[in-house]
Amino acid sequence: MPGIIEALLKLQEVQLEIFELRQEEVSREKRIALHRKELEKIDARAAQLDVALRDAKSAAALGELEVKTREQNIAKHREALKQTKTNKEYNAILTSLNTEEVDKGKCESRALELLAQSDQLRTQREEVEKERQAVLERIRLVDEALAAYRKKTAPQRQALEARRLAACEGIPAPALITFDRVAERHEGAAMAQVVKIHPKREEYCCGGCHIKVTLEVISSLRSRDDLQFCSACGRIFYAG
Ligand SMILES: [Zn+2]
């Protein structure tokens, strides 16, 4: 077992370098993911505005149509007014004409309101589009930087991968699988030293998470042939 522990420690050294190299990539990937989320929100807002704008436009068109209809009615009433024979008839048509005029005025101001609303929505939509373009540009820049970083570090990554493969040699598959699983959880640091807490007493803790380690684990670590794990953080123990 000491042979395997030593081999795992060497593997961890390489693994930590790989994780370090990955960090910059990871932070850029996270930034891209955040920008994409932002973009989704912007797209949703743009879609909402598109619907509102379409509705406002068709309402404005309807409003204009109504104004025209009222104008036609007014013209008809005016024509009818000329043909009236009695005062009663004249007054009745005049009342209708006046009502129509009032309604037309209302329709006109409503149509103007709707037009103003459309303009406002259009301006908002343009602002959202600008925001969208800015986020797309940010994504493009981070993407570019990420690609450049990957290209620049490719030889380093290849060398590390070769070293990793060499470090894996001789380590039994189950131990490797365990190592990878624990390393994944602790950013490459799968191994933890057992640390003596007290100079005079046989008391130990996990060097990774500082939880106390039982003497049973310590003696197994010294004598037995299987790997010993921290019960709290799951790291693989090695003796100090
Ligand atoms: Zn631990």
Image (spheres, rainbow, N blue to C red):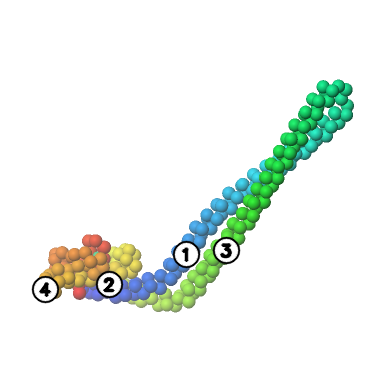
The residue closer to the viewer here, 225 or 124, is: 124
What residue sits 29% from the left and 75% below the top?
A: 10
- Of mark 1 and mark 4, the one earlier in the sequence is 1
The residue mark sitting in front, 2 or 4, is 4
The residue closer to the viewer here, 83 or 203, is: 83
- Of mark 2 and mark 4, the one earlier in the sequence is 2
Gap in Å between the C-alphas at discs 1 and 2? 33 Å
| Residue at the disc numbered 3 | 134
Amino acid carrying label 4: it is: Lys
Amino acid carrying label 2: it is: Leu
Residue 208 seen in render: yes
The image shows residue 103, relative to residue 120, as above or below, that is: above
Q: Quadrant of the N terminus?
A: bottom left
The image shows residue 93, relative to residue 36, as above or below, that is: above
The residue closer to the viewer here, 22 or 83, is: 83
What residue sits 14% from the left and 74% below the top?
A: 199
Residue 129 falls in which quadrant of the image? bottom right
